[in-house]
Amino acid sequence: MNSPPGGLRSEHTKEAIARRLQAARKHSYLGDFILGAVDGAVTTFAIVAGAAGAGLSNGVVLVLGLANVLADGFSMAAGNFLRARSDQQHLERFRRMEETHIDRFPEGEREEIRQIYQGKGFSGNVLENIVQVITEDRQQWVDTMLTEEWGLQLQPPSPWRAGLATMGAFVLAGLVPLLPLIFMLRQSADESFVASSVCTGLAFLAMGLIRGRVAAENPLKSGLETLFIGGSAAAVAFLVGWLLEGLATH
């Protein structure tokens, strides 16, 4: 959808451009949150669906679901923490390497800057001025090599924030399929499963809509896609539970 002319004008003021460029350099934890939320709802509802297919009681399903929310939520958070920590260490290693190269082979590193910007279409005196300005500032020189030569993000995500965002979203979304079981513990397993399916379907749709907004895609399409993927995972789990129902009763 196109922005109105007034909106475009306000987005291209000096202040708006500075804010947008600054935000682009930072990691958005919304992606970690959505990833954790989708995974939490899918895996927990898959357990609910599989247990329902196996004919297990609401109490057993609730115990299995809560165990999954806590264990898998922590596991996913730990994995995201280690990924973000690895990104930090990767950046630090390449920064040390580039600093060493600049100290030992400054002319070679200047030539790399020259060729990088030559590839962007600069030449002659303009190109030489760019090389001079960048290489006069050591910090800028190293940062340019990291972003232009290695394609690295100068501000990688915080491991703790990435991990907590993922686990928080996983737990919150993972509890959605279990809420009907908590309030309908004395009801029949079929009734609580239907209620859980409705709640989880709405959660899938909502997360998809949010994902579409964040990714600047069609929100409805993204919502239906998330609903379809989550529903497919649940259907597979339900089918497996139904086929193995006999094992659950022995």
Image (cartoon, grey):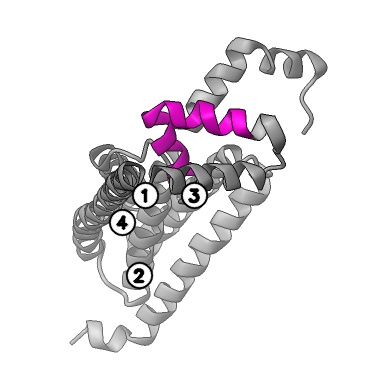
Q: Do the residues labelled 1 and 3 touch (CB within 8 Å)?
A: no
Q: Determine the secondary structure under disc 1.
A: helix
Identify residue type, mark 2: Ala
Identify residue type, mark 3: Glu
Q: Are marks 1 and 4 in contact (CB under 8 Å)?
A: no
Residue that badge 1 annotates: 36
Q: Determine the secondary structure under disc 3.
A: helix
Q: Is residue 21 above or below residue 40?
A: above
Identify residue type, mark 4: Gln
Q: Determine the secondary structure under disc 2.
A: helix
Q: Determine the secondary structure under disc 4.
A: loop
Q: What numbered label is drawn on residue 242?
A: none
Q: Quadrant of residue 245?
A: bottom left
Q: How many numbered tags mark residues here?
A: 4
3 sits left or right of 211 in the view: right
Q: Estimate the spatial distance between the alpha carbons at disc 3 and disc 4, rounded to whole Å.
A: 62 Å
Residue that badge 4 annotates: 187
Q: In this view, does 11 lie above or below 167?
A: above
N-terminal label among 4 and 2: 2
Which secondary structure class fits the magenta region best?
helix
Crowd rating for badge 4 (residues with CA inside 10 Å; few <14, some 14–19, many 20+): few
Residue located 33% across and 51% down the image = 174
Residue that badge 3 annotates: 149
